[in-house]
Image (tube, rainbow, N blue to C red):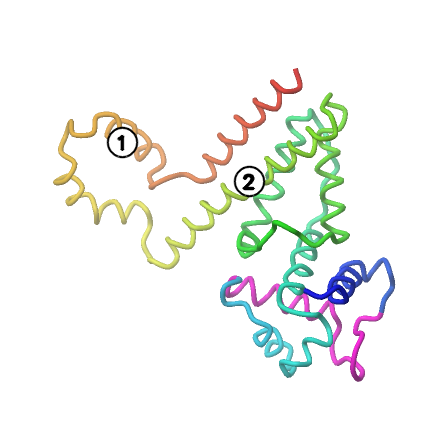
Amino acid sequence: MEKQDVDRTLTLLWRRTLGTPQGSRGPKQRVSVDEVIQAGIAVADAEGLPAFSMRKVADRLGLKLMSIYTYVPGRSELIGLMVDEVMGEVPHPPHSGTWRERLTGVARHLWDEYHRHPWLLQVESSRPWIGPNGTDRYEWQLAAIEGAGLTDLEMDQVVTVIGAFTAGAARMSVAARSTAEESGISDAEWWEVNAPILERVMPPGAYPLAGRVGTAAGEEYNAVADPARSFRFGLDRMLDGVQVLIR
């Protein structure tokens, strides 16, 4: 990636603050950068990132492929703009309650966002673009733990770990939903189909622990797993650990 592309992308991310023109090259633009970003989000929502392409975004807008590059430098830069855009589509609610309740709200906000836009789970995030909505979110997340007695580095680590855990839990939930939609059968129906063979290869007593625990879980969940319940359980255990750190 060339430096001018980085500069241009950051300028586009902060376009509402900097007041820069919506387009920067070529003749008068037919659409705005905002419209390009919204079209990109629509394509990603419908098809996911593996199938995402600049051509599909251009087709959605009725533009020629090469004209898209007069709005954004490239595919990865457009995805960065899309990520920052969706971070701002739902306002961050004011914090209230204990630090534990506030951090629970932070995690649930992320959980909901991943389910609205599952493609976010497919984004390479090792070096994210620093945009206004992402910066606002980081400020809001840190405010949830401000004053609890942690150092600045510990605050950053708590926010990072909760974000990573929530992404992992949401990934499992989104995958389960996609599997059910693509297969056309529920988990209960899947078990009914597979039960006769499983009973033959797993006779009573062959797997005493797996049999006992698996039966209890299956009866409770009425499914292979309960991702939302696992998310709540895991988040509570993480917050227990934060409480120990604070003490």
Q: Quadrant of residue 14?
A: bottom right
Closer to the eye: label 1 or 2: 2
Identify the element where label 2 is drawn: helix
Pick the front one: 225 or 69: 69
Q: Which residue is outermost to the top?
A: 247
187 up-or-down from 146: above or below: below
Q: Residues within 10 Å of mark 2 (few under 14, many from 20)?
A: many
Three-letter code for the amino acid on which mark 1 is drawn: Thr
| Residue 215 on image: x %, y % | 27, 31
235 up-or-down from 164: above or below: above
Magenta highlight on residue 203? no
Q: Which residue is mark 1?
A: 215
Q: Which mark is residue 129?
A: none
Q: CA distance from mark 1 to mark 2?
A: 27 Å
Identify which residue is drawn at 64% across, 83% down: 64
91 up-or-down from 44: above or below: above
Pick the front one: 150 or 213: 150
Identify which residue is drawn at 48% across, 47% down: 171
156 up-or-down from 246: above or below: below
| Residue 8 on image: x %, y % | 77, 65
Q: Residues within 10 Å of mark 1 (few under 14, many from 20)?
A: few
The quarter of the image holding the C terminus is top right
Marks 1 and 2 close (CB-CB < 8 Å): no
Identify the element where label 1 is drawn: helix
Q: Which mark is residue 166?
A: 2
